[in-house]
Image: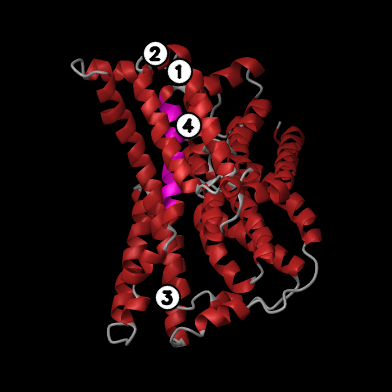
Amino acid sequence: MFFVVIAAFIVGYALIALEHPIKISKTATALFLGVTIWVLYVFAGESIFSATGFFGNFEHFKLLNPDKGFIDFVTKHELMEHLGDIAEILFFLMGAMTIVEVVDQHNGFQIVTNRITTKNKSKLLWILSFFTFFLSAVLDNMTTAIVMCALLRKLVANKHDRWFFAGMIILASNAGGAWSPIGDVTTIMLWIGGQISAVNIILKTFIPSLVCLLVPLIIISFKMKGDIANPSSQANIIDSEKVVLPRKISLLIFCIGIGGLLFVPVFKSVTHLPPYLGMLLSLSVLWIVTELLHYKHPQRRAYTCTSIISRIDTPSILFFLGILLAVAGLQSMGHLNLLAQTLDKTFQGDIYVINILIGLFSSVIDNVPLVAGAIGMYPLSVYPTDHSFWEFLAYCAGTGGSILIIGSAAGVAVMGMEKIDFIWYLKKISLWALLGYFCGAGTFYLLQMLFFA
C-alpha cells in the first residue's frame, strides 16, 4: 500500500501537468487525488505505519482514547487537524482575492498603472519584478502575487507577453518572501518557532534571494523585446462599461484595500492570531465602507462585496483544497517524515545538500510540511537559533517552489488567475527558475564561508 499511495500521487500530479492535452480540469484532478489519498490511508489501516515507521501520532491518540480505533484516529484527529490548517489558507486566499477584486472594480489600480508610463517590455518587466520582490517581503508571496496579477491585467493586453510577466511575478514573489520573516509561511514558522531572528534572516538571505531573482530576470528580459502598443487599452475597454467613479472614491478604496493587506502581518504580530483572521477583518472593514459609500448609488450592487465576491476564482480555491488534502495525507501517513529521515541518513547531516533537496522537493510537495518535518527532526539543541541551517532552509524552501508553477501558493494563485498552462511554464520558466535557485544557493554558501563562518 505504501507504493500504491506514492504511485497515486505521481499519477495525479502527471494528470494535473497534462491538463490541456487530456482536456480534464486540474481542479477536478486535484480534488480526486486529495480524496483518493485519504481513502487509501483508511484502507491501508495500521499497516501503513509499518512501512514508514511513523507511529507517534497514532500511539498518542490510542493512549488518550483507548476505546477508539484506527478509523476514528484518521477521521476525528488527522483529517480534522489538517482540515483546520487548510481552511486557514483557503479563507486567507478568498479574503485576499475579494479585496483585490473590490479595489479593481473601483478602478483603484489605475492609481498605480497611470504612473507606470514605460511601454518597453524589458523595462516594465524589471519594474514589476523589483516592485513584487520588495512588496512580497512586506505582505506575503501569495497576496503579492494576487495583487500584481491584477495590476498586470491593466498593463499588458497580449496573453503571451502577460504569461512571461506572470512567470516573473511568481519568481519575484517567492524570492522576496524568502528573505523576510513575514514574507512566507515557512519563514513565519521558523521565526515564531525561534529558529531564526528577524534581523539575521534578512542579513543572510537577502543577497541570495536577490540573485535568485536577478538570474532569470536578466535571461527572460532578453526575450521581451519591443514595446507594448497600448498598455492600458484593455483596461480602458473594461472600464468604459462601468460608471466612472470619482477619483477620491477610487483612491479611498485603494488605500483601504492595500492598507488592509499590509495590516495582516501587523495583526498577526500584535495578536498572535492566525493571518486569515486579519485578512477577514480587513475584508469586513472594506465591505462595510463600500456598503456605506454606495448606499444611494444607482448601480450599488456592482460595487459592494456582496456581488463582487461571486467573481473570485473558485476553481483555483478548490484546486488548492485538493492539492493540500493530498499533501496532508502523505504527511499523516509518514511519507514526508520518511523522506526527511532518508535525506538525513543519506547525506549524513550535510546541511547544504539536505536543504537544496528540500527546496527541489518543495516544487512538487508543499514546503510547509517539509519545513515542519525539518523543525521536528532538528531541535534547537542541534541547530541553535540563527544557525546557518535554518537560514538556508528558509531560502531553499521559499524559492524552490518557483521551479514548477504548482510548487508554491503564489504559483497556484497566478496559475488560476491567468490560466497558465503547466507545460508552458515548464518549458519557458522552470529552467531559468532552477538556474536562479542554484545561483542563489551558491551565493549563500560563498557568503557563509567568507563572512559568517
Inspect the image, locate mark 1, and give the three-letter code of the amino acid beneath it. Answer: Met
Type of the residue with mark 2: Ser
- Name the residue that disc number 2 marks: 47
| Residue receiving disc 4 | 372
Of helix, strand and loop, which one carries label 1?
A: loop
Q: Are marks 2 and 1 in contact (CB under 8 Å)?
A: yes
Q: Is residue 111 visible?
A: yes
- Sequence order check, earlier mark of 1 and 3: 1
- Does 421 sit above or below residue 357? below
Which SS class for mark 3? helix
Q: Establish if 281 lies above or below 20.
A: below
Q: Secondary structure at mark 2?
A: helix
Q: In which quarter of the view is residue 73 placed?
A: top left
Q: Nearer the viewer, mark 1 or mark 4?
A: 1
Q: Earlier in the sequence, mark 4 or mark 3?
A: 3
In the rendered image, the vertical position of residue 440 relative to residue 219, given as above or below: above
Q: Earlier in the sequence, mark 3 or mark 2?
A: 2
Left or right: 171 in relation to 15: right
In the drawing, what numbered circle is on residue 1?
1
Q: How many marks?
A: 4
Task: Return the x and y of residue 271 as percentages of the image width and height.
Answer: 34, 50
- The residue at 44%/75% (across/down) is 105
Write down the quadrant of residue 153 in the picture: bottom right
Magenta extent: 317-332
Residue 263 visible in the snapshot: no
